[in-house]
Image (tube, rainbow, N blue to C red):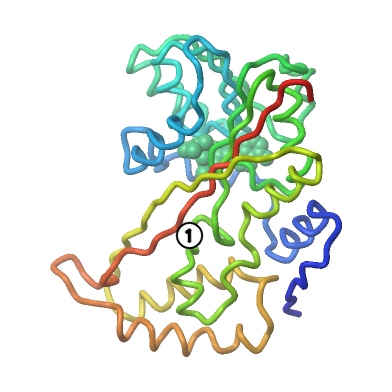
Amino acid sequence: MAYASKLTTTDWNEEWKELQRRRGRFDDPAHWDARAKTFPTKHGSHSSYVDRFLALAAIRPGETVLDMGCGTGALATPLAQGGCKVVACDFSRGMLDAMEAEQRALGVKGVKVLQLSWADDWPAAGLGAKSVDVALASRSIATYDLGESLGKLTSTARRRACITLPCGPSPKIGRRLLQAAGLPERLGADFLYAFNILADQGINPEVSYIPSSRREVFASPEEALDHYRGLLDGGVDGIASEEKLEAVPGRLRAWLADELVQGPEGWVLREPLEVDWAFIAWDCAGR
Ligand SMILES: C[S@@+](CC[C@H](N)C(=O)[O-])C[C@H]1O[C@@H](n2cnc3c(N)ncnc32)[C@H](O)[C@@H]1O
């Protein structure tokens, strides 16, 4: 049954877990091992995101940095190249292998690699309390127990923690697509849960925004409709009434009739979809 949050919660982590259960999203290393084969590194299309993340993170020269959910090293690699000591952790062996291969090719030194999950015992793996200066989780903290994951970053970092989470209900669903589908724009925005969990702990989180855009090419208007319906089917359970969900296919069809144009490569939206990331940082000293 569809569910519309009334935002009366006093426990943001329980609210988040309920949302994740309804979305059916659980942490699964096999999913990420499969994605590792094609996942971009910092040399791929994500470099403006990486530049902006690193500028906002304001890491000082020579600091020790935990990169949790490091993936193929989009942040770990430039940080090590810049002289930081990096502990790069991920639960996907495939992601770690891809990162290590690139770092070997580039001659990057100074990265300690650990296969580690958010749910593991970090001190037992050598990541004890206040063992790094800065703890990062870029696009990698949408875990089932978000409150516990945020707490682990706070307790592991001496100075600062920084994360990014989508401004919408998934990294692929931005405000424009929600508007087009007639769905609520703010409920289900992942970053709001982290912000509120931290605020409830007496932390004053800083928030900035990192714009990014997606440009997809389709063989036909039908393929575009299937694609956007599929994205929304997997992404918005838990944030809209059944009535609104039933209206989605018709609304998407009408929107695509206006927005899709045919170019030399195939069918594309007139303007690419914007899917922004919220960058959240907080002080960890004394916590
Ligand atoms: C979207 S990628 C982001 C990678 C990198 N941080 C970046 O910004 O490019 C998400 C990463 O988080 C990792 N991850 C997801 N859930 C995890 C978990 N429960 N424990 C450890 N790593 C996890 C995945 O294996 C994947 O490498």
Q: Which of 251 and 91 is in front in this view?
A: 251
Question: At x 70% / y 61%, what residue is drawn?
Answer: 24
User: In which quadrant is the N terminus drawn?
Assistant: bottom right
User: In what element is the residue under mark 1?
Assistant: loop
Q: Position of residue 226 (x, y in %)?
A: 43, 76
Residue, far left: 264
Question: At x 79% / y 39%, what residue is drawn?
Answer: 202
Question: At x 75% / y 61%, what residue is drawn?
Answer: 21
User: In which quadrant is the C terminus drawn?
Assistant: top right
Left or right of 26: which side holds 216?
A: left
Left or right of 1: which side holds 165?
A: left
Q: Is the CB atom of the residue marked by disc 1 within 8 angstroms of ligand 1's nearest atom?
A: no
Q: In this view, does 12 lie above or below 220?
A: above
Q: Where is residue 279 in the image (x, y as percent from the top left)?
A: 54, 43
Left or right of 209: which side holds 103?
A: left
Q: Position of residue 237 (x, y in %)?
A: 66, 71
State which image quarter holds ligand 1: top right
